[in-house]
Image (cartoon, helix red, strand yellow):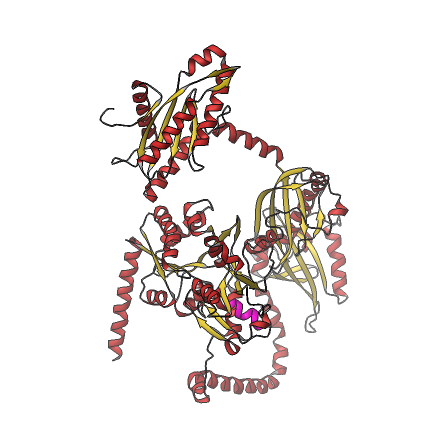
Amino acid sequence: MKRWILGYLAFAALILSVSGTTLAQGFQEVRFGIYAYRPDFIMKERYQPLVDYLTGRIGIPVKLQVLDQEQMRAALASNQLDFFLTNPSQFLVIRSERSLTGELATLVRKHDGVATASLGGVIFTAATRNDINGLSDVRGRTIASPGLHFLGGFQTQALELKGAGVDVLNNNRIKLVRSHDRVVRSVLTGDADVGFVRTGILEELIADDPRLADRIRILNRQNLVGFPYAVSTRLYPEWPVAALPHVDSDIVRRVASALFAIEENYPAALSAGIAGFAPPADYQSVEYLARELRVEPYDELPQLTWGELVGQYWGWLVATVILVLLLTGSMLWLRRKKRELAAEQLRLRRLILSWPQPMLMLRGGEFVDSNRAALELLRYAMPRSLLGKDIAAFSPQTQPDGDVSRQKIQRLLQRVDRGEVVQVEWVFRRSDGSEVWVDMTLAPVHDTEEPHPHVLCSWYDITGRKEAEQRQRMAASVFDHAREAIFITDLHGAIIDVNDAYVAITGRARANAIGRLPPLPLEEGIGVLASARSHGFWSGEFASKRQDGERFNMALTVSEVRDAQGAISHFMGIFSDITRLKAQEKELRTLAHYDPLTHLPNRVLFTDRMQQVMAQARRQDDLLAVLYIDLDQFKPVNDAYGHKAGDELLVEVANRMRAQLREEDTLARLGGDEFAALIVNVTEPAVLENLLARLLHAISEPVPVAGHLVQVSASIGFTLYPQAEELDGDQLLRQADQAMYQAKKRGRNRYCGFDSAAS
């Protein structure tokens, strides 16, 4: 039987080895599971762009799987998933059941322009329920929840109510409806008195049906600065992304890199309503919640009988009994050996010389023995390099305090001879000429068997500490003389010190700044410190005001400062006035991307937008129209009335054309009297032709310039995308240009579509 088991284990190890090798060589497909807290079709619609983005970034097809709790457990148990994104509570359960590579990232959601990596719970009731106004009113009511394993849909609310004296598991009837959407419907229809949903759900539903805001009322609403959602509970970390151990480490790194690279304006982020992904958060608060509520994976305690205890730990019990017997015997033996140990003290004194820290023995002021650590500290190879010499022989002429080294060590040894233990900071010169700081202790060794007393000398290398002190002094000098404004706050954000540049930039006197909050972005406020606490720093640019009310732009970086124990003790902020730089950047962006006369996008910006709408058309299977517009008879107007009149005509025609287009369409001036336009989401040819007719009519209306009414027309060529053959932006623009020339040949003041046969 034993041989069969060993054979089976060897076979299993072989299979796992082959499987691991295959995975390392390359994945045919990466399976990405997402927990379904909303209906499946909503989850797929929101997160499919994220999966498509990952496919493009890692070079391997990524397949989206939207799963409920049981489906995700089954998929993980059968290794049908490679990565998964789920709520923190279910993540703890999965982590307790199987090994994971670890959290790769934490989801960052976005609402109304504010990003957050935290979530909480919302407790709400129908607006007509005047009998439910506070947490205590929830006792005994029927509660609708998507499930007991939902962190934001049950557990955060349960803990908050428990703190208010309401035990919902024992005092309330819980209706588990499996999704947040059904929770809202249950409360509105009266099937439940109170509903539990996670933060962000109500905002999403209200965006679809604004009337919902007047039909519900949120209980225990928290006003948390920098948090964009309505919330009734304390906050916890957002959803983690985790990888399974069988996934090749190179793929894990590529996926993590792709997640961190997501910007809030990416289509994948916009579709999912997120701002991207942050480094993994600390999920200890979620573990505390699970333990406090005794929910999975902390819902059971091991039950052991005395028999099981003895059976399971009999080896430790026997060892403990033997240890007690040995300790008792040792005490009796030590009592008998007390006199013998006294004779061994001399040998033990010499054994000290093998201590890992540098230790030496002096007699008559000279070294008589040394351990290896002391030789290595002074960078000597052999003990004879030290023996017979005094401490001053390995010291600079003078110590940093100005005392002559030889005179100072003589005074210290005189104190040791009187029985004192002396501790002093000392500088030695190594064999290579470099200097090392040590904390030196000199202690007398009283031995009645030797006529001359010995001195035990121990060193502790403090060079690093001294260099740190020097850096600290340099930092203080930088603080005082830096041209950037620097401030230091306590843990609560109150300023405790500022430098002169802070006073110069803000106009606030140092006395007025102390004890107040530093300049922070209006949207996030004190949340900046929370972000610095979570991620180690916060950096951003925003507008602020000086003491006299003058507005200016600043670039601010806030970093945490930790003490020797690793705990955050302060926050330090550095900012500079970038008002002039911002103005220059704005002017440069305008000059680079917009026509200075009409303020329309120029050819550079038009080309960039064309690439974007072409990608959107391919992705969404929409129709895109590219227009090339050339004004007829513009040159005679320019020649007759001058360039200024021609410029006025161009501005008026540009404004008229822009008024005929939709907000999502793009109109650009390519140069002279030539314009181009991008018309997105063309539903049918009749709609496009109607737009082209309106453009021709608007352009042909008389224009007052230079005291005269002038009239011009336009020739418009257009082409559509996508076509049977894949084209780039330049090819599309050339097709529209060719169609425009066909319109001119046919008599001008008309539009013409691109015909490949004619071209």
Place residue 635 in its image quadrant: top left
Does 748 appear above or below 503? above
Q: Position of residue 275 (x, y in %)?
A: 48, 50
For the question of whether residue 296 can be seen, the reply is: no
Q: Where is residue 478 in the image (x, y as percent from the top left)?
A: 67, 42
Q: What stretch is highlighted in magenta?
A: 155-162
Pick whichever, 152 or 678, lies toward us: 678
Does 227 appear above or below 3? above
Pick whichever, 690 or 75, lies toward us: 690
Residue visible at 31% across and 51% down?
A: 61
Q: Is residue 703 left or right of residue 696?
A: right
Residue visible at 67% across and 58% down?
A: 439
Pick whichever, 700 or 15, lies toward us: 700
Q: In this figure, what is the number of numbered marks?
A: 0
Q: Which residue lies furthest to the bottom in this view?
A: 307
Q: Position of residue 144 (x, y in %)?
A: 47, 69
Pick whichever, 402 or 509, lies toward us: 509
Q: Where is residue 14 in the image (x, y as percent from the top left)?
A: 26, 65
Q: In this view, does 258 lie to the left or right of 195?
A: left
Quadrant of the rendering where the N terminus is positioned = bottom left
Q: Which residue lies furthest to the left in this view?
A: 757
For the question of whether residue 222 can be seen, the reply is: yes
Quadrant of the rendering where the C terminus is positioned = top left
Inspect the magenta stretch and tell me whether residue 661 lies in it.
no
SS majority, magenta:
helix
